[in-house]
Amino acid sequence: MNAQTVQHELLLARRMARLGTETAFEVLSKAKALERQGRSIIHLEIGEPDFDTPENIVEAAVDALHKGWTHYGPSAGLPELRHEIAKYVSRTRGVDVFPDEVVVVPGGKPIMFFTMMALIDEGDEVIYPNPGFPIYESMINYVGGTAVPIQLHEERDFALDVNELAALITDRTKLIILNSPQNPTGGILPREDIEEVARIIGDRNIMVLSDEIYSRLQFEGEPFSIMQIPGMQERTILLDGFSKTYAMTGWRIGYGVMRPDLAAQMTRLMTNSNSCTASFTQMAGIEALRGDQSAVGRMCAEFKHRSEIFVGGLNRIKGFSCRMPKGAFYVFPNITATGWQSKALADALLEQTGVAALSGTAFGKFGEGYVRFSVANSLANLAEALHRIDQWARENL
């Protein structure tokens, strides 16, 4: 007699209902499914450089594998890489950073997650940019914090309004998230605004998570970090990494820079979750920071060139209006004149034209009325995407 298999109900923890997602990967999956059906798809949905990792970095990883860098390392990262990151951040931000302030993690997201886990209690308020990277809001909600969005306005080139920020700060505010250059808008926070943010915070014990993952992809001027302002370094968690700068998204290597006592707590979270970041990728990270930087400059210049062409093309299409981004590799056109809701339009572009984009609402409620295109694709494909979108607009608007 065969025993019957009982299908038990999956009893998830309640906190799982508070966990969001990153829509880019969902749209990518849908686009790939259409490709398997024989459809021609232009991928403008996923946020990663379309360039290969520079050869010197690849060779450093291969060499590390041959030399046995395939075992566990310290949870905070290899001392050699932490030392190199400390030197790099000291040089680029003009502050003194030491290796015990650096925590190396597999990608940038763990720094977001660990920051929330380490600092945010039930009901603590976190102010974050909206439209903004969706994992901010997801992690705030997951740990039981109160997500307080600050709207990024198109008329300000998607820089936050410091007066609005001041009005959102309360006695419950524990953390403020800044992101410049910004995903999804390509906007930046000018130095004077960052200085004003620091003035507004004053001497209050509010931490800042400064997401500077696109800092090497700013098109004009020098990026400025809030940790450079006197009195703010001890209250800043700098998030940076290798994915965007060196086209190393699949390598999964990022880092946070913060005061040593918080770094020790982040390291405990690493020990409890990932154990460590892969050793051979860390050796490649050392080469990335020490080696030839010319590939970074070429990628940045190419992303600016592509953005200029794509923005110009969008502004000639009925119903679309787009500002030139100031960094990263995204354009964020206003589509309210089309009369379509953001998600419906993004779905239509994918299903009817084969152009994969993201709804502005994938980045928060204030993203309604916009869509995001990644320009991390060839000029030929970007031109074809513009042609398809234009044809669709002529037929549907």
Image (cartoon, rainbow, N blue to C red):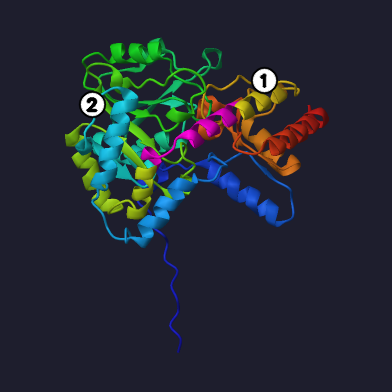
* Spot occupied by residue 215 in the image (x, y as percentages of width and height): 43, 28
Is residue 153 visible in this depiction of the protein? yes
| Image-based side of 358 in relation to 231, left or right | right
Measured Cα–Cα span from mark 2 to mark 1: 43 Å
Q: Is residue 294 magenta?
A: yes
Mark 1, residues whose alpha carbon is within 10 Å: few (<14), some, or many (≥20)? many
Q: Nearer the viewer, residue 136 or 99?
A: 99
Q: Give the mark toward the camera: 2 or 1.
A: 2
Mark 2, residues whose alpha carbon is within 10 Å: few (<14), some, or many (≥20)? few
Give residue 321's mark: 1
- Name the residue located 61 percent from the left edge and 25 percent from the top edge: 369
What residue did someone put label 2 on?
A: 96
Q: Nearer the viewer, residue 315 or 69?
A: 69
Viewport quadrant of the N terminus: bottom left
Using the image, determine if residue 351 lies above or below residue 161.
Answer: below
User: If you read the primary sequence from the N terminus, does the residue marked by circle 2 or circle 1 appear first?
Assistant: 2
Is residue 176 visible in this depiction of the protein? no
Amino acid type, mark 1: Ser
Q: Quadrant of residue 20?
A: top left
* Secondary structure found at label 2: loop
Magenta region, residue range: 288-304
- Name the residue located 23 percent from the left edge and 26 percent from the top edge: 96
Q: Are marks 2 and 1 in contact (CB under 8 Å)?
A: no
| Image-based side of 35 in relation to 178, left or right | right
Q: Quadrant of residue 263?
A: top left
- Name the residue located 44 percent from the left edge and 52 percent from the top edge: 59
